[in-house]
Amino acid sequence: MTAEDREPRAEGTAFGDALAELEDRGCNFLVVGAVPSDVHHRVSQQLFGAETAARHRLLVLLARNDDELESRFGFPPSQMPPGTVSVVRHSMLLRSTATDVTREPFSNRVDTDRLSDLGLAISEEVLGFVQSTTRREPGWFRLGFDSLLPLLENYETEPVFRLLRTMTHRIRDVSGMGHFHLSVPMDAAVVDRLRPIFDGLVEIRAREGGYQQRWHLIERGVSSSWDRL
């Protein structure tokens, strides 16, 4: 984690120490909040971190069929060095539209509805990143998943949970950080069901004409204060 990243932390506190430990060993966060998509995009930019060639980023797109990748990354991915940014798109996005997505050189589309094929495509991208770099500091790899709602709405629960468990374990294995977006309220039943898969929750809410975030670290049972986005 670099100084440019904006995750909330209070050095010397139980929360700050627990977050630093998670970052060192690899971790995954579920980002929840019934807020507009552009607010989730702002959190995604925060979690992908500062624009640096030393970091590798993978974006998995399920929520909508568009090409506004900069809103997720916080910078044009095409301007990053080759091999440091990748996008996996799922074919379920294309069912209701006749227009295809732009074929970026760093983009990979999964053309089947099988979750196992989506999982395989993601695993292959992660393996490619691992094989392409020898200097891997904690947080060197970031995966963003936008969003989980299409999976939960179109597939049985257990296969989705199995896919998420596989992905989160893989991210921890390479000392990376994953963030998975779910646009539902914090008290939704599905959040409680998904909680054991993740290391923490990032809760977003609307307040006083803006938006705030609060982080919850599940294993340690500690939370940050509310922080303005």
Image (cartoon, rainbow, N blue to C red):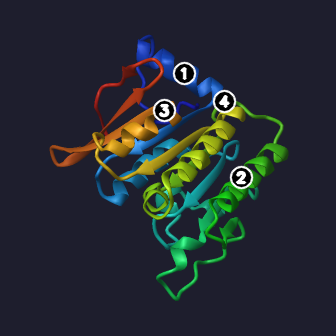
Please state the horizontal and vertical placement of residue 25, each as a whole percent of the image.
64, 25
Residue underneath mark 1: 20
Residue underneath mark 3: 196
Q: Could you tell me which residue is drawn at 58 percent across and 58 percent down?
A: 60
| Label 4 crowd bin: few (<14), some (14–19), many (20+), radius 10 Å | many
**Contact? badges 4 and 2 (CB < 8 Å):** no
| Label 2 crowd bin: few (<14), some (14–19), many (20+), radius 10 Å | many
Q: Could you tell me which residue is drawn at 79 percent across and 34 percent down?
A: 135
Q: Secondary structure at mark 1?
A: helix
Q: Could you tell me which residue is drawn at 49 percent across and 73 percent down?
A: 66
Judged left or right of residue 115, residue 29 is left
Identified by mark 3, the residue type is Pro
Which residue in the rendered view is the most extreme toward the left? 208
Identified by mark 4, the residue type is Pro
Q: Earlier in the sequence, mark 3 or mark 1?
A: 1
* Residue 58: numbered disc: none
Q: Earlier in the sequence, mark 2 or mark 1?
A: 1
Q: Secondary structure at mark 4?
A: loop
Which is in the foreground here, disc 3 or disc 2?
3
Identified by mark 2, the residue type is Thr
Which residue in the rendered view is the most extreme toward the bottom? 98
Residue underneath mark 4: 138
Q: Earlier in the sequence, mark 4 or mark 1?
A: 1
Q: Could you tell me which residue is drawn at 54 percent across and 21 percent down?
A: 20
- Disc 3 to disc 2, how far (Cα)? 30 Å
Please state the horizontal and vertical placement of residue 171, each as a whole percent of the image.
65, 39
